[in-house]
Amino acid sequence: MSSTPTDARLMDGSGLARRLVEETAARAADLTRRTGTPPCLATVLVGEDPASVTYVRMKRARCEKAGIRSRHVELPATTTTAELVATLEGLSNDPEVHGILLQHPVGPGLDERAAFEAIAPEKDVDGVTFSSFATMSFGLPGFVSCTPGGIMRLLDAYGVDPAGKRAVVVGRSAILGKPAGMMLLARNATVTYCHSHTADLSAAVREADILVAAVGRPRFIKGEDIKPGAVVVDAGYNPGNVGDVDFDTAVTRAGLITPVPGGVGPMTIAVLLAQTVDAAERQLA
């Protein structure tokens, strides 16, 4: 007998992202019409890592479709931290640039945190600075990290209210795991942070009403550990289009689950574009 009737409902990030980009494009067109200035996102890429080159090219193409001007800055792999910081400070001081994206990781030998902090908070549309983390944590106006921001929009779109729920975040990166947990906490979830070194991770996962997998290891979360009916958000993306959750088994236990690809990924770029227009609106007001 087929298990399809009991399989989880898929959370369609692609469809939600498409609608968000359409709304963003309309806002960008209106802003350009009113001010004579289109929103502008500056992308900065250090070196020629193939995956990073592809990501930046994709983001620039999405900008164009949304009516957002893209300025691309390519720096050689030999770039020093001081040179990268100077580039980002220059863009931060350029009134024609409204948002800045530093493609990360920036490569060995560079101080990525120093580079992030060279981005002016009002142009940090990727949500990577200390300032953005603080505003996220305290629920104040500002920019959120794009992937956690996309996750929260997905939860809202599917009627998932985190209040009173047990949320388990597996992963603790500064731009994904940590801010995702803080945003869930701000929405009154009870949050547990876990990671690859957590003792008896399975026991923690089994308690999760909402599970965010962001550890960067393929199929690291086993489907049999998913609490029946839980909301599973897989923010992992590994070679072969594989997430951090063992989807084939998890889908038979979860209530809602994001596919990989087509779940969290499209939302990340959509939030980046939306926040770029937000930044431009504030700067051009």
Image (cartoon, rainbow, N blue to C red):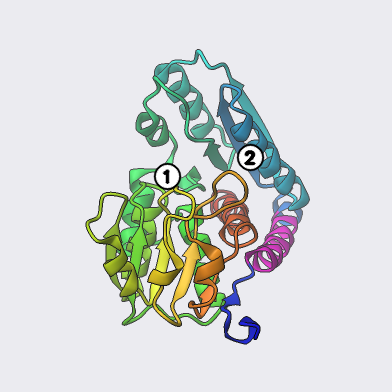
Q: Position of residue 180 (x, y in %)?
A: 39, 60
Q: Is residue 234 in sight in this rendering? A: yes
Labelled disc at residue 128? 1
* In this rendering, position of residue 135 left or right of residue 104: left
* In this rendering, position of residue 29 left or right of residue 45: right
Quarter containing the C terminus: bottom right
Rendered view: 108 above or below 214: above
Q: How many marks?
A: 2
Q: Which residue is mark 2?
A: 55
What span is in magenta? 13-31
Rendered view: 52 above or below 17: above
Please, which residue is most extreme toward the left here?
199
Q: Position of residue 114 (x, y in %)?
A: 35, 30
In this rendered view, identify the residue nearer to me: 143 or 178.
178
Q: In which image quadrant can residue 23 be found?
A: bottom right
Rendered view: 188 above or below 40: below
Which secondary structure lies at badge 1? Answer: loop
Q: In which image quadrant can residue 221 be found?
A: bottom left
Spatial separation of the CA atoms under disc 1 and disc 2: 17 Å
Q: In which image quadrant can residue 281 be found?
A: bottom right
Q: Residue at x 62, y 51 (%)?
A: 241
Which secondary structure lies at badge 2? Answer: helix
Q: Amino acid at mark 1?
A: Val
